[in-house]
């Protein structure tokens, strides 16, 4: 039985350095709706890179599944070993840049994996240096809300562009337009529709349906795709040979076998690692704002946001990934769409979800990669992989858009935020960020970059002693 949390305290765990280890069934309870979603949605999304790994990186289907399993295990370490209060995921906006860098110049498969290792190590170095020095946390505090809003809205625009880019043959709407449209519409309706939320408040069955988040849309996509012949399900039997395929994967991809990237390759990959840090920073800002908004509605659990911890934990995961399963971009800090779903249930009260970490751990199937081992499940989900990614992106985009609009104070800041977002979504990240900074400086003014001084404890006590001001309600 999981340990009971004292009202208003942090969820119990084992502290080690700046991190907290939380073990399922010891420190965490199972949240059934999130667990069921995780089996289908989290597993399918984790497998979304399998077709690319087999077509462009020389891996067999089984080796690609094992690599995806390692990626998921490392992602789960974010909440399991390190205690980050986010639903972790890929640095998805970085992937197009990664593909262009790694695949665009040709080379052998070994050289491609060396490039992935170089990117991962450079990115990890940036994160760990900023984490150890504490500069990462200070940087998050220094960024004004108008720039935060621009970064978050830019992520929303980029997500929408990816969902509706029909020129991409791998796009879900291009491959299965009917099934994908049904899934996206149902996903948005169940998650954000005001009329549905009003009906769900009156009818318990609708509340239960909404509690399953992405899963109903995922099931509908599979049924519709089957009857419209957009999906072809070929079920394989048996269990995956994890040890055998992990051994051959190690020989094909690990720098311990194929060699470490050259100094020249490390230098060449550094600019992309810096650009990816900007994307990581945007996800971190988004995650912080989402948790801050949600925890105002729950005073029975204290959620500790520690950006230094987030930098260090993500850096450590990238180092491990670069050695075991090098594929850069798969070890980020936030899966926005899933964070939305979990927080929506968490804010409903302790009777719905005891701890935020219960929901996160359950969504990642308690960190146990059962799905990746059972071939019938893997082969059943294979046609649905593009749908899983599209559903995640549409949730991410809508949540980011609504959140960004709540961060700015007036129409001037709102205009500067939109220009920043458009620049970030259309140009390379460092150019978009530069355009945003110049726009904010010229239109809003440099004063927004001066952090507001927080009152000291003594000043807060003095204000409290004065009581309410005359005429106040």
Image: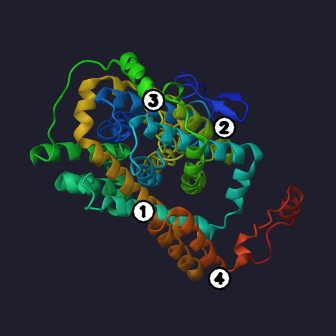
Residue 355: image quadrant is top right
Query: Marks 2 and 3: in contact by CB < 8 Å?
Result: no
Residue 132: image quadrant is top right
Q: Mark 1 points at which residue?
A: 158
**Among the two numbered marks 3 and 1 on one chain, the one whose residue lies closer to the N terminus:** 3
Q: Can residue 269 be seen in this view?
A: yes
| Disc 3, SS | helix
Mark sitting on residue 70: 3
Q: Residues within 10 Å of mark 2 (few under 14, many from 20)?
A: some
Q: Nearer the viewer, residue 394 or 162?
A: 162
Q: Nearer the viewer, residue 190 or 440?
A: 440
Spatial CA span between label 2 and label 1: 35 Å
Rendered position, 247 above or below 74: above
Q: Name the residue under label 4.
A: 442
Mark sitting on residue 10: 2
**Among the two numbered marks 3 and 4 on one chain, the one whose residue lies closer to the N terminus:** 3
Q: In front of the other: label 3 or label 2?
A: 3
Q: Position of residue 163 (x, y in %)?
A: 32, 58
């Amino acid at each position: 039985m999981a340990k009971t949390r004292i009202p208003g305290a942090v969820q119990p765990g084992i502290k080690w350095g700046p991190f907290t280890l939380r073990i399922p069934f010891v420190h965490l309870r199972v949240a059934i709706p999130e667990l069921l979603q995780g089996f289908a949605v989290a597993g399918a999304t984790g497998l979304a890179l399998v077709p690319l790994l087999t077509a462009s990186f020389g891996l067999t289907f089984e080796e690609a599944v094992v690599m995806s399993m390692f990626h998921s295990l490392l992602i789960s370490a974010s909440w399991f070993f390190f205690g980050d209060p986010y639903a972790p995921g890929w640095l998805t906006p970085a992937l197009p840049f990664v593909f262009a860098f790694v695949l665009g110049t040709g080379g052998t498969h070994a050289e491609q994996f060396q490039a992935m290792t170089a990117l991962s190590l450079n990115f990890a170095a940036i994160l760990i240096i900023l984490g150890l020095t504490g500069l990462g946390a200070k940087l998050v505090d220094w960024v004004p809300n108008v720039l935060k809003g621009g970064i978050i809205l830019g992520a929303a625009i980029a997500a929408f562009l990816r969902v509706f880019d029909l020129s991409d043959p791998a796009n879900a709407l291009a491959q299965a337009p009917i099934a994908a449209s049904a899934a996206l519409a149902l996903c948005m309706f169940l998650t954000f529709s005001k009329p549905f939320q009003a009906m769900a408040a009156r009818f318990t069955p609708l509340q239960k349906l909404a509690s399953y988040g992405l899963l109903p849309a995922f099931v509908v996509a599979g049924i519709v795709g089957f009857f419209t012949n957009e999906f072809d399900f070929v079920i394989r039997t048996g269990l995956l040979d994890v040890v055998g395929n992990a051994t051959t994967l190690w020989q094909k991809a690990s720098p311990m076998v194929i060699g470490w990237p050259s100094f020249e390759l490390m230098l060449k990959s550094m600019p992309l690692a810096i650009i990816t840090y900007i994307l990581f920073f945007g996800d971190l800002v988004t995650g912080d704002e989402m948790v801050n908004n949600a925890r105002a509605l729950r005073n029975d659990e204290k959620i500790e946001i520690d950006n230094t911890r987030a930098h260090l934990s993500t850096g450590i995961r990238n180092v491990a990934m670069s050695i075991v399963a090098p594929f850069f971009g798969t070890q980020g800090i936030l899966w926005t769409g899933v964070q939305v779903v979990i927080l929506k249930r968490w804010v409903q009260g302790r009777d719905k979800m005891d701890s935020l970490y219960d929901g996160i751990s359950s969504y990642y199937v308690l960190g146990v990669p059962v799905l990746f081992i059972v071939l019938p499940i893997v082969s059943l989900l294979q046609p649905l992989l593009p749908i899983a990614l599209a559903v995640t992106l549409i949730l991410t985009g809508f949540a980011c858009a609504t959140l960004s609009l709540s961060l700015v104070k007036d129409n001037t800041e709102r205009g500067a935020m939109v220009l920043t977002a458009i620049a970030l979504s259309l140009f390379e990240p460092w150019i978009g960020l530069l355009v945003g900074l110049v726009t904010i400086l010229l239109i809003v003014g440099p004063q927004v970059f001066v952090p507001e001084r927080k009152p000291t404890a003594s000043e807060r006590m003095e204000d409290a002693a004065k009581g309410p001001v005359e005429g106040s309600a």
